[in-house]
Image (tube, rainbow, N blue to C red):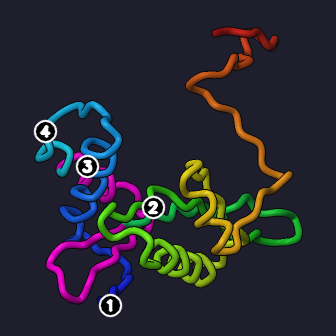
Amino acid sequence: MSVTVRRAGPEDVAALASLRWGWRVDEAGEEPAGTAAQYLQTMSDWWASHPGHVAVLAQPSDAPEAVGMAWLAMGDRVPSPAGLRPRSAWVQSVYVRPDHRDRGIGRGMLGFVADVARTENCAYLAVHPSPRSTSLYERCGYASSDGLLELRLDSAEVPRERGGQAVMSR
């Protein structure tokens, strides 16, 4: 079976929404906020308003449905006095349907998004891998970075500034 990895267009939003729904609701057990049809509309509206995101689909030659997706969120870096800085990019929502895993599809999609990022003059790609996917990213050349820190706003005690003073809140 051959698989084509390609940049998705607006006409592919139903395939992207279906893959993400299958991953997050059917596979991971996430409770949906609405119906699949409502999610399709949400995904369509969201993508139309986020032109800095690139979606990628993996499509087998012998099947009518896409079996994998990946997203690339790119952003411009702040210019320095020496000139414009390259862009940066985050790999997001890489997913391959369970019945198509371990066939090189994820690796193909990651190679594709890396090529897009190079074309877009990105200095680096970053990702927050799941424990299960870490080995895939490592096989594709990703490495841990001492230069990346994260503040989890959904669970950490976050300092907030009030009246010029930082205060701690939960």
Estimate the x, y position of residue 28 in percent, counting from the top left.
35, 41
Q: Hey, what amino acid is under mark 2? A: Val
Q: Is residue 46 left or right of residue 76?
A: left
**Disc with the residue nearer the chain's start (2 vs 4):** 4
Q: Secondary structure at mark 1?
A: loop
Q: Hey, what amino acid is under mark 1? A: Ser
Instruction: Please report the residue visible at 32 percent of the width from the left and 50 percent of the height from the top.
Output: 23
- Rendered image: mark on residue 35: 4
Total count of labels: 4
Estimate the x, y position of residue 41 in percent, counting from the top left.
17, 49
Which residue in the protein does label 3 denote?
Answer: 21
Which residue in the protein does label 2 denote?
Answer: 94
Residue range in magenta is 41-68
The nearer-to-camera label among 1 and 2 is: 1
On screen, residue 62 above or below 160: below
**Disc with the residue nearer the chain's start (3 vs 1):** 1
Q: Hey, what amino acid is under mark 3? A: Trp
On screen, residue 131 above or below 101: above
